[in-house]
Image (cartoon, rainbow, N blue to C red):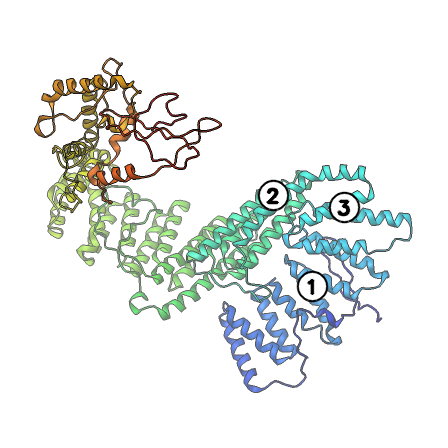
Amino acid sequence: MDEPVQNEDIHLDGDQTQPTGEIIAALNQNGSSNSIKTEADLDSPTSEFDALFARLSENPHDPEGWKRLIELATNSGEIPKIQKAYDEVLKYYPNTSSAQIAYISHFLNDESTFTEAEQLFIKFLRSSPNVDLWKFYLTYVRRRNTGPSTREIVRKSYDFALSHIGQDKDAGEIYNDYIQFLKAGDASSTWEEQQKMDALRKAYHKAVQIPLDNVERLWSELETFETNLNKITAKKFMSDLSPAHMQARTVLRQLTSHLNGLYPANQGSELFLPSVPKFDAADRSLVGKWKAYLKWEESNPLEIEEKDKHTLVTRIQGVYRKAVIRMRFYGEIWFMAYTWTNTIPGKQDEALAILKSGLEANPSSYLLAFAYAEATELKKDYAEAHSTFEKLITSLSKGLDELEKISPPAANGVPDEPNSSQSTNDSFNSQGSDSKPVKSKKPTELQERRTEYGLAYIMWMRFARRAEGLQSLRKVFAKARKDRWAPWEVYEASALMEYHCFDDKTVASRIFEKGLEYFGDEIDYVCRYLGFLISINDGNNARALFERVIPTFPADRARQLWERWARYEYQYGDLEAAIKLEKRMSEVYPNDPPIKRFAQRHIYLGVDAIAARDLGFAIARRHNAGSTPALGKTETLQSLNAGNTSGAKRPASPDHRGKREDNRNFNEGGTGYKRQRGNQSPSRDRDVPMRDRDRDHRDRDGRDRWGDNRRRFSPAPAPPAGASNWENKERDRDDRDGSRGYGPGGREIKKEESFRGAPPQAQIPPIVSWFVGELPPAASFDGPIFKTEDLMKCFKNAIIPSSGAGGPGGGPPPPRVRSPAPSGPSGYTQHHRGGGGRPPPDYGPYQGPGGGGRGRRY
């Protein structure tokens, strides 16, 4: 074996590994199988490579273009071209493990390139949170160190790797390999055997408390391992570790649920390069999932104790490193990583490095640029803060130039003016610098980007004033004046800083006047200038400005300027001037009613008593708030019923029971005899029928409210001798109540009682009455209609199996007795089976105990 190659060791937090210099060719399991070519490639692929490389240098946010570039370099087989392609890819997409592994694999085919492979390992492993790269590195170390004398190097390499990515869910395979490596070690003495067992126990105990993908299998192996050593100590060890292990298993399920939505299932080992977000629904959903996952990790779901806070910090730090790799072009994720890291004592420099890396990936990010500038300002590094603003403005200006080329000519100039047709009542809203008149016309993208561009200059001026004073502020404003993309907001911000921070009205007014030369057609700027003059009590110049600019704007754009000056005249001018101004406004806006201008003259802080009280708007608002526009249920049902009256319905059978059916339909809400109601509220429509039914119930001494009692309830059985008495009671009550009928012919719908002498039945509870009142009427049913006679005939002719025999030996069934149908409700007996087969059913009255064995009443 050759001597190990002397190279720079890997130093991360004090850990180091010492890989030797030889590389076995079999290590290249994930790399390219193409042999390295020494001859020059053809001109055509070379030309395509160079052209694509030049294009990607100008527009690096093209994942498919980078994949094509790597493909061209790999197919060429030339090491310089491969290095050029991968170095450029990893410049814009650092810590992309799939690209790093493929890059290193190209140097494992020739002995002369071993040193380059080792240097790449040293370069990439310093900040990589990806388990795949660490697995590739450990495979390299184990295959390079196969002898007994090199086992210590392999062990240190495993410890080094697990100290960085040991908290990752996918690190379970590394733990398993490490444990198997420890088990395979030879022990020539008792001391070495004890050291081996201690190392195994330490690895097992650490692994089973982490939500690894194979944590349950490692727990089973640990239990077997401890039991084989000592059953007594095994019970103690397992009992102590059980709560942490169960917590890890619970967290594993939650972690898997989070990660399933963050990583595509079919990605595999394919080169993944993040793309610039479009912020569509899919992108917003992905950002939301990442934010939820990161907040969940910050909440310490493993409940790691304070004494092990370093473990928690390492875990969350690895999570954020993976997040900024996958979500490289999302400034919000970078800012979350910075915010969390900045809260960890002693990691402020690392937090600042995160912001700097985020700015390299997103040079046009306002969020990251402002955060980085503030952080450097707090560190008194003013030069770096100035450089940050300069880079931001350069990047934004380049974007505006590109957008100008593809925008229509109308959008290349100043933004469109607002159609300020809406009046405002607040007389103080234009005196502050933070409130901006609302534009009713939607600005173009170029106009929006230009306004946002001015925000960078304003923040730069704020920083310069805070950090270095007036002269630095004026230097930044001088740069903004030379920038053709600087909007009018920059002039206003500079003027207000001069006035509020240095009490210089003269310079502030000169800045406003200078801005008027460039933005004289911007109604918003003119209103802000006018508001500033009013706020410093410079009424003469304010009046002069108003009279100078008001003729330059058409009526539809000048309304807010008229109203702003009118509010000033109303509050601080005399009545004659206010009336003269209203006369001029009436000539410009002849359609405005005089009461509107009169009411605006008597408004203060938005309080308009004339509109609220004299015109009744306050009362109207209260009425509108208390009204319910929904249509009542009864009204809706009446509409449905009215629409169904003309529908074709299957008529009932014309027989002697027709009157009863008609009456039942009336009682159940049918349309045949339903009394038409006037316009009533929904609650009254529901309550009136129930009160009518309750009154009928009380008038009839407890009789049922819902129809023929013979069809609904089964009274107590009467002896056969009482049949005539029952019929007499029926006739007596018919004679007594016949004159109070509501149905055809003056007959009232019969509602029978069980016995005249019995106490009245209990009334239905109010909640049941309400429920029945909520049910739709029978007329709203649009399903199939069956003839009652046909159904009854079917039931009478049906052969129903009888119940079991009444005694052990059974007996012959009683003779079938066909009795006339009783006038009152009656049950029937299901006869028991005997040995004589299935008898026909008996619909006679129930004969009491012993009259046919066990029977069941229906």
Which residue occupies the foreground of this view, 792 or 533? 792
Distance CA(mark 1)–CA(mark 3): 30 Å
Q: In this view, does 406 lie above or below 640?
A: below
Quadrant hosting residue 827: top left
How many angstroms separate mark 2 from mark 1 (CA)?
30 Å
Q: In the shown orientation, is residue 145 left or right of residue 752?
A: right
Q: How far apart are marks 2 and 3 (CA)?
A: 22 Å
Of circles 2 and 1, the one toward us is: 2
Above or below residue 194? Residue 836 is above
**Any mark on residue 22, and which?**
none
Q: Where is 786 relative to 74, above or below?
A: above
Foreground mark, 1 or 3, reads 3
Residue depicted at 75% across the width and 55% down the height: 178
Q: Residues within 10 Å of mark 3 (few under 14, many from 20)?
A: few
Tell me the kind of residue under disc 3: Thr
Residue at numbered disc 3: 224
Using residue 382 as the reference point, say whether residue 731 is left or right of it. left
Q: Which residue is labeled 1 in the image?
A: 136
